[in-house]
């Protein structure tokens, strides 16, 4: 094998060079030589036995075996199947070579030969296929040791072996067949499959296809259900591996076998008082299965949500809720871990499922003679339990019940009726016959006299769920008034005022064991008050009815000894007194609250309280409900023994960092705080950007002076008003700028990179940018128009210039032509002057006579033409006159006036005659 040579090289680098070879190496080499080349069968078997013994005891022998032994052992397993003892020995040797030697001490950073051998063997797919083929052998020990080898390989090289088994035909089928084998083989195969199916969806589907569900529940029933041993635990672990994040397998289980076999495991058999550790682990594993069926993953998928809702519906139809209530509430002897897990399952099974909520609300527990509503029993657990984990798990039920369930909240609120003072101080055991609301109010008022407010804060947590996002319930609880502990202390006071008083008392009061829980109690009461005042102006009015409430809140916000979250929630409460304040009374309106914050705390310091709270553990760790850590053999023991370990941690100086308290500040509440924070910042900027209402100041300048005319008085008043308006605008602008800067500083934190602008600052900046953009757009339009006009003028001037240039060129050419003509004329004149005697002047008189003669000829020709025309006209007149005479007309009379009409003088007519 090529891998062996590489392995030898690694061994040489890790453990030394050739000079470090020990006697064990030589001994292992000789044994392998005897096994490989021996003639006698007994000698070869003896060598195999010796090899197994030395490899099981020595790391050096394991190392030498890894370098030389695998080829020899594989040949034995492949070619000597008939020699059962030889094959058994080979498999035992493999188990020994792959198992770490914990009893042999060595350096911490020393390489483990067993792990290197596992890596070497798992790389060979042929070796895995050969091992799986051995599962079909008839010999019991061969099958047993083969399963052990595969289990060790899976433990140390899970992913590689999963891939190898998937490529081998019928590999998983052979493993599944082992579940029907003898008990020891079955248990080993079960353990092997739990490793093989971890986070391997393809393998999970094949295992289920091979009938895993039927075989698992058959084994569990055979072993005695929850009362069984570790085999039941292994079966449930395998079942959980097959169902975890695998929707198709969950649907197959629901549609084929159903959930009845699973619910049967939760039923308590025999003595309900006997809970061994193994039984506890088995019940926790079964409850984990329920959790996997009803809790969705981190990614939101509508299809998966519908599938989970179907699982919840079927589980409740199969009476799973009855068994869960039995484990969580009725079985007082159940371990804390089981009760908490059952309570969490009840919470998850009713979450976002209206029908299941109604079923829980209608459930009654106890015997026929004394029954009690299930919700009352769960509330009693919250008020009485000494385990904080159990309180948080039970509190989750009311969170799930009240979330987006206004009818359920109204139903619980309708029972809130204070009991007489005599009943309020009755022992806890006498609350069995009380209604839900009476028990809750009793818990809210219990503990003041003996200095323990923990019961009160737990009841406050339940009340916060009842009031969450429900204005009608908030208004109704506002009307609840409590009697004073003693008549001498005054009249009855509203429930809200009592809660604020307990908030103030919490910082100074001690619990019965002397451990201060001020931060823990204050946080829960503050959560109730923040929830109560949210979107409820009447609650804000009731809160501000007592002036000391505002004074105490201002002190709490600036109290350095208070926890970060306590100061942050107190700041949120102050902010609610601003944004939901509808009062116009002086001293209680929004402007007065902001003014008090500015004077007593400082707006910069006030805004920083939000950022400090958002960075705290409770708010940064608030995430959606996540799946619990898988329950395996290694973690089962620790999970089964959780009991009250958290109570010792409540005395830490930073109570808000307690991990279990993070469940009180769930994702929904944190989102509410974040939205309130942005609204608070925005409203404080608005308050600072507008003047205080109802300010009436009448300066002396407004009075009319003696002797001042009405016209001058009006003119002076107009000037005064204009001046005042100008100053008001300047002040408003300055206030807005200051508010923006304060909001920016408050949201900025310690460094510029971590600045988080508030909603108000964003709004102001957006408005400013919008105005600037509008002005810039207008200027741009004007510039575009000016540019177009300039371009038009430029084009006109360019054309005019071209025309003028053309005209100038024409004038220039004409001028040049004239210059040349003038030059020639001057030249001719000079020539004529210089040569006057030689050139005779023309005969002017002869020329005139010739011209006169030509003119006379032309006139005579024209006169002849005229005479011809007159003759023609005369002949026409004569013909017409003769015709007229024939017609009987007087020709002379008709011809009269024709000469006058033509405007001819008489002498001309005479000449014509």
Image: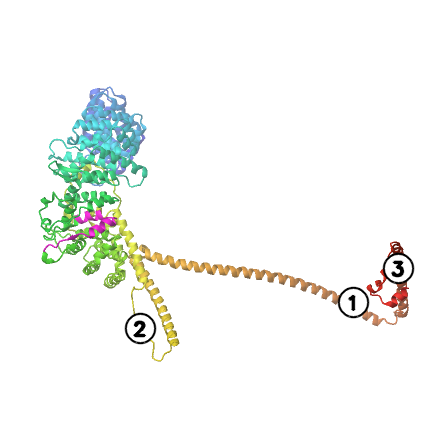
Front: mark 2 or 1: 2
Farthest residue, direction front: 888
- Quick one: label 1, few (<14), some, or many (20+) residues within 10 Å? few
- Quick one: label 2, few (<14), some, or many (20+) residues within 10 Å? few
> Tag on residue 824?
1
| Upstream in sequence: badge 1 or badge 3 | 1
Farthest residue, direction bottom: 707
> Tag on residue 870?
3
Q: Secondary structure at mark 1?
A: helix
Q: Which residues are magenta?
A: 459-486
464 drawn magenta: yes
How far apart are the alpha carbons under marks 1 and 3?
Answer: 54 Å
Q: Quadrant of residue 45?
A: top left
| Upstream in sequence: badge 2 or badge 3 | 2
Q: Quadrant of residue 53?
A: top left
Res 21 visible: no
Q: Secondary structure at mark 2?
A: loop
> Tag on residue 699?
2
């Amino acid at each position: 094998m090529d891998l062996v040579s590489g392995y030898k090289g690694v061994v040489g680098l890790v453990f030394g060079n050739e000079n470090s070879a020990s006697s064990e190496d030589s001994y292992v080499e000789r044994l392998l030589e005897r096994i490989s080349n021996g003639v006698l069968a007994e000698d070869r078997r003896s060598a195999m036995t010796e090899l197994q013994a030395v490899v099981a005891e020595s790391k050096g022998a394991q190392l030498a075996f890894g370098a030389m032994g695998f080829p020899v052992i594989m040949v034995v397993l492949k070619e000597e199947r008939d020699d059962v003892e030889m094959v058994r020995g080979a498999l035992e040797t493999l188990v020994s070579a792959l198992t770490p030697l914990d009893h042999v001490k060595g350096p911490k950073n020393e390489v483990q030969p067993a792990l290197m051998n596992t890596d070497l063997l798992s790389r060979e797919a042929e070796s895995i296929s050969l091992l799986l083929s051995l599962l079909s052998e008839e010999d019991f020990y061969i099958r047993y040791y083969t399963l052990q080898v595969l289990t060790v390989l899976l433990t140390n090289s899970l992913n590689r072996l999963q891939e190898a088994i998937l490529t081998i035909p019928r590999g998983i089928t052979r493993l599944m067949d082992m579940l029907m084998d003898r008990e020891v083989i079955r248990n080993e195969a079960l353990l092997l499959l739990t490793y093989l199916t971890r986070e391997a969806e393809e393998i999970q589907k094949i295992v289920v296809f091979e009938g895993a569900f039927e075989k698992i529940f058959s084994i569990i029933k055979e072993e005695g259900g929850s009362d069984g041993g570790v085999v039941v635990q292994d079966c449930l672990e395998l079942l959980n591996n097959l169902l975890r994040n695998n929707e198709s397998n969950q649907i197959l289980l629901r549609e084929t076998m159903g959930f009845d076999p699973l619910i049967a495991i939760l039923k308590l058999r025999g003595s309900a008082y006997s809970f061994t550790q193994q039984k506890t682990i088995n019940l926790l594993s079964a409850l984990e299965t329920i959790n996997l069926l009803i809790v969705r993953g981190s990614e939101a998928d509508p299809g998966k949500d519908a599938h989970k809702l179907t699982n919840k519906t079927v589980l409740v139809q199969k009476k799973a809720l009855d068994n869960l209530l039995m484990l969580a509430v009725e079985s007082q002897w159940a371990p804390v871990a089981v009760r908490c897990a059952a309570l969490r399952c009840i919470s998850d099974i009713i979450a976002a499922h209206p029908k299941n909520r109604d079923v829980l609300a209608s459930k009654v527990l106890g015997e026929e003679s004394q029954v009690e509503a299930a919700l009352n029993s769960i509330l009693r657990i919250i008020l009485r339990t000494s385990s904080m984990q159990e309180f948080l798990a039970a509190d989750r039920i009311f969170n799930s019940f009240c979330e987006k369930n206004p009818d359920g909240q109204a139903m619980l609120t309708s029972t809130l009726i204070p009991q007489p003072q005599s009943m309020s101080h009755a022992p806890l055991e006498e609350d069995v016959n009380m209604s839900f609301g009476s028990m809750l109010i009793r818990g809210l008022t219990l503990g003041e006299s003996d200095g323990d407010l923990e019961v009160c804060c737990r009841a406050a947590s339940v009340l916060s769920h009842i009031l969450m996002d429900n204005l009608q319930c908030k208004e109704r609880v506002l009307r609840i008034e409590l009697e004073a502990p003693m008549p001498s202390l005054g009249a009855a006071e509203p429930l809200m005022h009592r809660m604020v008083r307990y908030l103030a008392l919490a910082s100074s009061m001690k619990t019965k064991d002397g451990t201060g829980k001020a931060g823990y109690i204050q946080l829960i009461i503050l959560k109730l008050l923040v929830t109560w005042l949210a979107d409820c102006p009447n609650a804000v009015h009731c809160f501000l009815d007592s002036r000391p409430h505002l004074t105490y809140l201002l002190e709490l916000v600036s109290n350095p000894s208070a926890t970060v979250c306590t100061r942050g929630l107190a700041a949120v409460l102050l902010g609610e007194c601003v944004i939901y304040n509808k009062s116009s009374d002086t001293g209680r309106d929004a402007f007065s609250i902001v003014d008090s914050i500015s004077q007593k705390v400082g707006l910069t310091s006030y805004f920083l309280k939000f950022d400090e709270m958002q960075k705290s553990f409770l708010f940064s760790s608030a995430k959606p409900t996540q799946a619990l850590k898988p329950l395996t053999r290694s973690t089962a023991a620790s999970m089964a023994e959780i009991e009250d370990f958290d109570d010792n941690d409540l005395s830490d100086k930073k109570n808000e960092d307690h991990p279990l308290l993070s469940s009180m500040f769930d994702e929904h509440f944190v989102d509410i705080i974040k939205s309130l924070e942005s609204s608070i910042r925005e409203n404080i900027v608005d308050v600072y950007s507008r003047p205080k209402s109802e300010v009436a100041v009448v300066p002396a300048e407004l009075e009319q002076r003696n002797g001042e005319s009405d016209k001058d008085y009006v003119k002076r008043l107009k000037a005064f008003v204009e001046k005042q308006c100008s100053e008001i605008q300047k002040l408003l602008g300055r206030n807005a700028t200051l508010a923006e800067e304060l909001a920016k500083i408050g949201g900025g934190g310690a460094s510029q990179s971590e600045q988080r602008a508030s909603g108000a600052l964003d709004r102001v900046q957006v408005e400013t940018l919008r105005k600037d953009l509008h002005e810039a757009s207008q200027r741009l339009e004007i510039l575009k128009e000016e540019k177009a006009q300039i371009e038009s003028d430029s084009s006109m001037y360019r054309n005019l210039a071209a025309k003028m240039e053309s005209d100038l060129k024409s004038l220039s050419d004409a001028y040049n032509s004239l210059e040349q003509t003038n030059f020639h004329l001057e030249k001719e004149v000079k020539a004529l002057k210089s040569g006057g005697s030689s050139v005779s002047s023309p005969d002017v008189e002869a020329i005139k006579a010739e011209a006169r003669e030509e003119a006379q000829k032309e006139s005579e020709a024209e006169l002849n033409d005229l005479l011809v025309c007159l003759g023609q006209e005369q002949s026409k007149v004569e013909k017409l006159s003769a015709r007229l005479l024939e017609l009987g007309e007087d020709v002379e009379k008709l011809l009269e006036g024709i000469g006058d009409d033509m405007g001819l003088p008489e002498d001309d007519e005479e000449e014509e005659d």
